[in-house]
Amino acid sequence: MNPSPDTHESATDYEMVVGLEVHVQLKTSTKAFCNCSTDFGAPPNTNTCPVCLALPGALPVLNLHAVELAVRTASALRCTVHETSIFARKNYFYPDLPKGYQISQFDRPLATDGALVIGETEKHTPITVGITRVHMEEDAGKSIHDRYPDATAIDLNRAGVPLIEIVSEPDMRSSAEAGSFLRVLKQLLEYAQVSDVSMEEGSLRVDANVSARRRGETRLGTKTEVKNMNSFSGVERALEAEFARHCGMLDRGEAIVQQTMLWDGAKGEVRPARSKEDSHDYRYFPEPDLPPLVLTKDWIDEQSALLPELPAAKRERFASRYGLNAYDIDVLVADRELANYFEAVVVAHADPKTACNWVMGEVRGALNANNLDVAAFPIRPPDLARLLDMVQDGVVSRSAAKRVFAVMLATGGKPEAVARDEGLLQVSDDGQLDGWIDAAIAAHPDEWTRFRGGEKKLQGVLVGAVMKQSGGRADPRKVNQLLAERAKE
Amino acid sequence: MSDDLLSMTAHALGAAVAAGRVRAVDAVDKSLARARELDGGDAPLNCFLTLADPAAHDEAIRMDGGHVDADAPRPLAGVPVAIKDNIATHTLPTSCGSRILHGYVSPYEATAVRLLRAAGAIVMGKANMDEFAMGSSTENSAYGPTRNPIDPSRVPGGSSGGSAAAVAAGITSIALGSETGGSVRQPAAFCGVVGVKPTYGRVSRYGLVAFASSLDQVGVFGRTVDDAALAFQVIAAHDPRDATSATAPVDDYRVGDGDLTGLVVGKPAEYFPESLDPAVRDRSERALDALRSRGATIRDVSMPHTELAIPVYYIVAPAEASSNLARFDGVRYGLRVPQPQLRDMYEATRSQGFGPEVTRRILLGTYVLSAGYYDAYYRQAQRVRSLIAADFANVFSSGVDVLFTPTTPTPAFPFGAKSDPYEMYLSDIFTVTANLAGVPAMSLPIGRVDGLPVGGQILAPHFGEAAMFRVAYALESVLGAEAHR
Amino acid sequence: MAVNEREVRRIAELARLGIEDARVPMLVDELNRILEHMDVLSKVDTGRLAPVEGMGAGAMPLRHDAGPPIPLARTREEFAPELRDGFFTVPRLATHGDPDGGMESGA
């Protein structure tokens, strides 16, 4: 078997195998093991105390809320949450790791054996990615290398912030699947309200384990770990780059060395992290300052029950209860706030199809055009619902309603007041309508004659002309009726 | 009057100061003066690394002037106490007997110190110790050894040698020490005072600089059983800042009418080996007779895994220590030896900051935790540890109330006598078991051999301190002056 | 089991202890004389025994997610070896490529 010199060509002979390790900061007010605030942006080292400065003699005490959030996340990932788990020390020296060890979990983690379904869209067949484990640990501080020419600056405000690490099985076969996993996971964490989940702000961090093997091969190839990605697309690009490197080496008959690679997003390449031989001898042992974490099954179930509706369940419910199509469901469920907005409109207005059309069309359009979050959107769901009621009741026409919407967006006004002030209330008064009809007939004498002669399809043209004359205020139902009556005269 | 102040019990002094019959400043000044006298001169005892001079004097004056909130009972009002230098005090340095923490003043105070001060005690100094509590002779202090007040040519024991010597020399009536494998009981035995190691979790470890977290406990010294019980009563409390702190109710430890009728005292054969110093055996048998005379039944028992205790201990303790001492890196506090590269800074700081025994134990602990050795050493040691704990559980569930043993195989040894590390480790042979099992234990004087004190050890079930003190009160009262002869 | 010089050097590196070359053989000897006493443990049958994991009587106590933080009685300036603009500082580390750098930063 001659190795092909053409890496690009040969990449199709290989299959990418990816597993992900995701660190997520939990949304607590205080740190994992002390009362210090988790707020960002405080002056350096001011959110610190004897515990997170690792002063001699200080001891950790675990934050209940961190456990609650971790258990909820594990439940959302369909893991088995263990009634007994054990904290362990991961020992290594780094200046932003104050104790010289990180309190983590090792051989008895909080939860194991979960699953996350990805690709649940109209286009793809769903793939189930196994979740190996979810465990709790604490964050390190920040090392700032570019502040001083001669020194690295250490800020321990982040040291001790609670994290969970989510480890997946190597169940993904492409960078796109890895990207999909991350997007679905992010959505799940947002729904579960356990984290701010921002990769840019560092509240979600991703390391990837990648290997390559010939298609059809069932054994795993030697993997490398890729770090230092700061966006989901960065993860996808890094995986492609590392996979190409593996393929090239395999083609040349070279052995892959198990090592850590760093992604350089600016250059679009991976390079080995220079590692000491000791860098992976973490000397884990049970943390003697913390007894085993013992949870009852009832408590675990209670925490699980506190989870809000998760994306998969919402998707199913939007289909069965509201009869929405798959595309609309995907768009709505992708943004929990938008989905909630939609439902709030439905609660007040009752016609899900209309509500969906407006949220998918006008609301999303306005959000995008103005770069707004749903939370900051000036038209609140009850107001939109009343506007839709007004359309349904014939108080404003559909086209007028869009203008009312635009004014509400700009001024924050209520729909009734805006429609009245802008003169957009629908007119059903025969006298006023007759005037507009006269004007429309005068402008379209030919069409009028043919319409009277029986060409019914021309009714639309004439109604449109009347609407135009009325500035959108004429009640189209009434206009149709009057036109039909006049044609018989 | 003033000499009497130094010989008064903590109980009597505290009552006298609280009642206004004695001024706290007189007690404190007398204590400071005696410390200066004994720690000075040609053959200084070197009990203290720092004296609270004049801070303790000033604090006593404030107390005498009524400028201290005194709503709560203050059983230790005006009582000078010595604090082992590995227990955090926020007005005096906490060096742990190490160069790496030279001059370090903790920005917070240990719970045990806070409780003592709330009870009226006045911290008059920080006591010398083996560096980071690693040692059995106080010879491992970076600031020179402490001498045994009974025989200055001999060690006071360790690692809480300074605390034990301060009490034995009459500088204070009570002191705080810390235990990991016998560091209170062994120096108490060597210096002829009472030393108590609580049940694991009974006293908060918050502010005790960690050596081996699963073994460490703050302990107390007293010249009498009652003073030790009084000090222990004050510091025994649940502390929400220590996740291993016990929530079990705190008993009244200062009870004992001297009657031991119906009590079963176990005499474990493994603590009376053939090789035991005959004089130590003799004093121990005399103590057992004393317990019989008060109605106790002595029952021979066996604790078959005792011989494994030292190997287990010298794996578990260094392993935890290697991790606990990683924080001494020169980044946030303590010694920094500047170097252009971070790694060199770490290595220079730690090699110059730590003494030879600490270095040895960090290496040993790092080794037994490292890849490929963890299962054979650390995990196996923790398994065997459960056998040692089971020995205690078995004997205490078989109708035995407490155990009595010698505290150490020999009395205090001369300086430099144990140059081989493992030989030094063996001086903890009768004490490490209680730390491994987490049970309470204490040592009290039961006589002397060639003028050197011999200690007897009482061990009790978890949270059985009340029974332990009851036996100690009885033994002390029967032996009387014999305990110091 | 026994250690050799190479292992002692490796452990010393792991523990960030600078050991002079001349001292290494002595340490090998000292550690081996200690370790030989540990071999007795390997002969103990502990097949079904669980190792001790966590001392004390109870399970993990949990604290509420609220302040106030434990106050410091002294400022960082009073105990830090080197502080600039509120930062602890150490010799500069390259972000990548430095022997101590980069890869272990963060969690």
Image (spheres, rainbow, N blue to C red):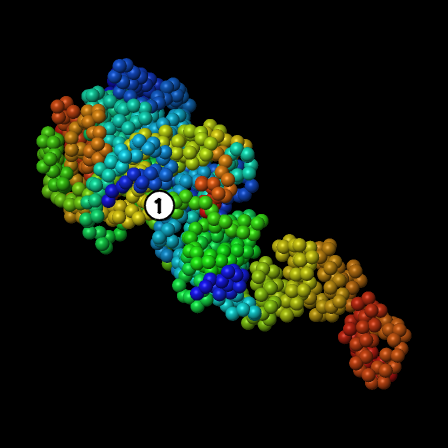
Q: Name the foreground residue: A440 vs A23.
A: A23
Q: Where residue A141 sits in the image (x, y, percent)?
A: 48, 41
Is residue B209 left or right of A32 when viewed as pictured? left
Is residue A267 left or right of C36 when viewed as pictured? right
A163 over B432 or under it: above or below: below
Judged from this view, the residue extending furthest toward the bottom is A454
Q: Residue at x 19, y 51 (%)?
A: C45
Q: Name the foreground residue: B359 vs B466.
A: B359
Q: Where residue C37 sits in the image (x, y, percent)?
A: 20, 41
A161 over A55 or under it: above or below: below
* Three-letter code, disc 1: Arg
Q: Where residue B216 sits in the image (x, y, percent)?
A: 30, 38
Q: Where residue B397 sits in the image (x, y, percent)?
A: 18, 48
Q: Residue at x 35, y 19 (%)?
A: B25
Quickly name the residue at label 1: A283
One can see residue A170 in this view: yes
Question: Mark 1, residues whose alpha carbon is within 10 Å: few (<14), some, or many (≥20)?
Answer: many
| Chain letter for mark 1 | A
Q: Residue at x 81, y 75 (%)?
A: A461
